[in-house]
Image (spheres, grey):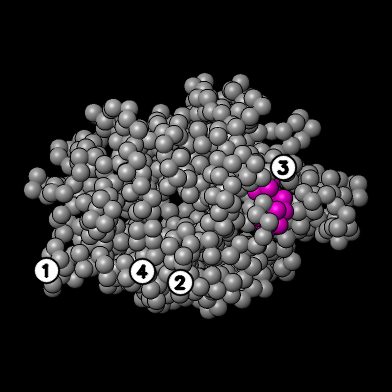
Amino acid sequence: MSHKQNPFLTEHQTPHGTLPFHLIETEHFEPAIEEGMDRHNREIEAIINDPAEPSFDNTIVALEKSGALLNLVTTVFGNLLSAETSDELQAIAERMMPKLSEHSNNITLNEALFARIKQVYDRADLEAMDTEDRMLLQTTYDGFIRSGANLNPEQKERFRQLSSELSVLTLRFSQNNLKETNSYELPLQPDQLAGLPESALNAYAETAKEKGQEGYIVTLQAPSFVPFMKYSQCRELRQQLYMAYNTQCTHDNEYNNLEIVKKLVNLRLERAQLLGFSTAADYVLTRRMAENSGNVYQLLNQLLEAYAPTAHREVEEVTALAKELEGEDFTLMPWDWAYYSEKLKEKKFNWDEEALRPYFELNRVIDGVFGLATRLYGITFRENKDIPVYHADVKAYEVFDRDGSFLAVLYTDFHPRASKRSGAWMTSYKEQWKDENGNSRPHVSVTMNFTKPSADKPALLTFSEVNTFLHEFGHALHGMFANTTYQSLSGTNVYWDFVELPSQIMENFAIEKDFLNTFAKHYETGENIPEEMIQRIVDASNFNVAYACLRQLSFGLLDMAWYTRTEPFDGDVRSYEKAAWEKTQVLPDIAETCMTVQFSHIMAGGYSAGYYSYKWAEVLDADAFSLFQKNGIFHAETANSFRENVLSKGGTEHPMVLYKRFRGQEPSIDALLKRNGIIN
């Protein structure tokens, strides 16, 4: 294929230089990646062969700017692999991942290149440098060390092998998970519909229709699975669906991840030890706010101690209601938890999540969330249909700053499909940087798996989906407000345990009456959400909060158990998992279930030895939001300070420095305990 036809290798006129998705075909990726690697290699050679004395500009900045084409193509490719995948795309990934890993290693293990970097680093007067320049130099130097630049030739060879194997296995882990999720369906008979709300039945009928069948089909995707577990009166089917969900990737088929888990854990351990660390967690945590596994365990155990008594009381309360309804000899099992919790919530707070749905029509929620950003930061959003998108479900918005200048492009992609992985995430298609042409603005995207519209109803969200939207939108603001010189320090390129602060702080608005009143109107009548309903949302906001906390802690402890190992693992994955989180478990254990084999965050995502960061950031966000509560939740000066000191700064300074500049103090867990009603 000639370069002329490949949209990655030719110029295109699109608004704000957005990606020409309408022209990109699957067959364009491989040649564009190959060309990107070739160009990158030539750029690296030019740096190495520069006859001038190594300097910050001709070495560090030149390296920062190298690989632009490769970065672009792999960014689009990686994003579509998650949001709009296909067998062809996955086959390309299988072929290209080892090559890309090799290419990356060829750069970080290049002795001549590292010699120049080291020369610049050793001669630099770090104290006298500009903050951003200093951070770029430090992260570049550290990055090379962490990628094996100081190893001997034999160790470098092994490092290459480890990187290559890891890239292939993480991909396979994710693909197995997606395929296992997509391959399951539970058809419902007419006598198995009891308790299911109309919204769920409409969705299940829609799924059946999409699959060319009659009746109702439940899948393992969250908008399908969650309502079934909450509302279905058929306990046998709840058990069946629960077991299907919680035994994914453990079956005797090609999607089994048990051996892959062992390999991933052992390869990460070997890589860390090769670099002189005793565990994979030690390797990861040197570039985190937490700094070491001792501090992570301290946080997890502190929270466990604070929340466990309340969690046990919550379980006793749900169990008591179940016995009252089903008889004294009833044993509450994990597949009963969501169902009887919902019943208790209804009883205690007159809570009915389904009754809230009509007030959370997706377009109004979008208006509400965008409107919140307008109120806090003065930014505005305008859909632009001329911006190409990668799927018909996707919308593209231009975002303008309070002075009317162009700020960013925002893509939104809200509904599940077979080609999209589960969950919700924010990503960038283009990050922000500054150069001689000015301030190059970012293109960011939020991807969800929300309840779809049906034949006779628009998309009506649950309250937890509204929360998820706010969370991912917080990440998007972090990307859109980026205002740094270097792309690698821009936006969400921050320490991993700081990256969840901008997202989680936004979730606080979900229970604020003044925010809900701006958009929550009945989709048919246009009536505002009733005051007593909002009060119920507020009253119920801490319902089973300790149980939820222990669940998060269990994931954090499981993650740390895998990555604080000093010896390779060759045991039974299930029993190791159960021992790792035993002290957080408040419901009966089911022998066959296994979380690790489908825990993409810690096995295939960026959260290995990092899952604790959700709780870490929760401590930060409760502490930070207490300032909004003190000054007023729409307080412009507080919002502006958060934008200036946190959202726009990316990774240009240590996160604790940025945090204290906004907050005026170090965080403590007290604000979180107060918010959750654990202490008064």
> Given the image, on which type of amino acid does mark 3 rest?
Thr
> Given the image, on which type of amino acid does mark 4 rest?
Ala
Q: Is residue 264 magenta?
A: no
Tell me the CA gap for discs 2 and 4: 10 Å
Question: Depth check: 287 or 148 in front?
Answer: 287
Which residue corresponds to mark 1? 327
Hey, which quadrant is residue 439 in on the image? top right
- Considering the numbered disc 2 on the image, is that residue within a helix, a strand or a loop? helix
| Mark 4 Cα shell of 10 Å, populated few (<14), some (14-19), many (≥20) | many
- Position above or below: 158 against 485: below
Question: Depth check: 329 or 147 in front?
Answer: 329
Tell me the CA gap for discs 1 and 3: 63 Å
> Which is more N-terminal, label 4 or label 2?
2
Q: Residue at x 49, y 40 (%)?
A: 446
| Mark 3 Cα shell of 10 Å, populated few (<14), some (14-19), many (≥20) | many
Query: Whole-percent x and y of residue 174?
Result: 43, 53
> Which is more N-terminal, label 3 or label 1?
1
Which disc number belongs to residue 263?
Answer: none
- Position above or below: 361 against 112: above
| Mark 2 Cα shell of 10 Å, populated few (<14), some (14-19), many (≥20) | some
Q: Residue at x 76, y 53 (%)?
A: 135
Which residue corresponds to mark 4? 311
Which residue corresponds to mark 2? 306
> Which is more N-terminal, label 1 or label 4?
4
> Given the image, on which type of amino acid does mark 1 rest?
Gly
- Position above or below: 541 against 223: below
Which one is closest to the eye, mark 1 or mark 3?
Answer: 1
Query: Whole-percent x and y of residue 250?
Result: 32, 64
Which disc number belongs to residue 484?
Answer: 3
Q: Residue at x 63, y 29 (%)?
A: 402
- Considering the numbered disc 3 on the image, is that residue within a helix, a strand or a loop? loop
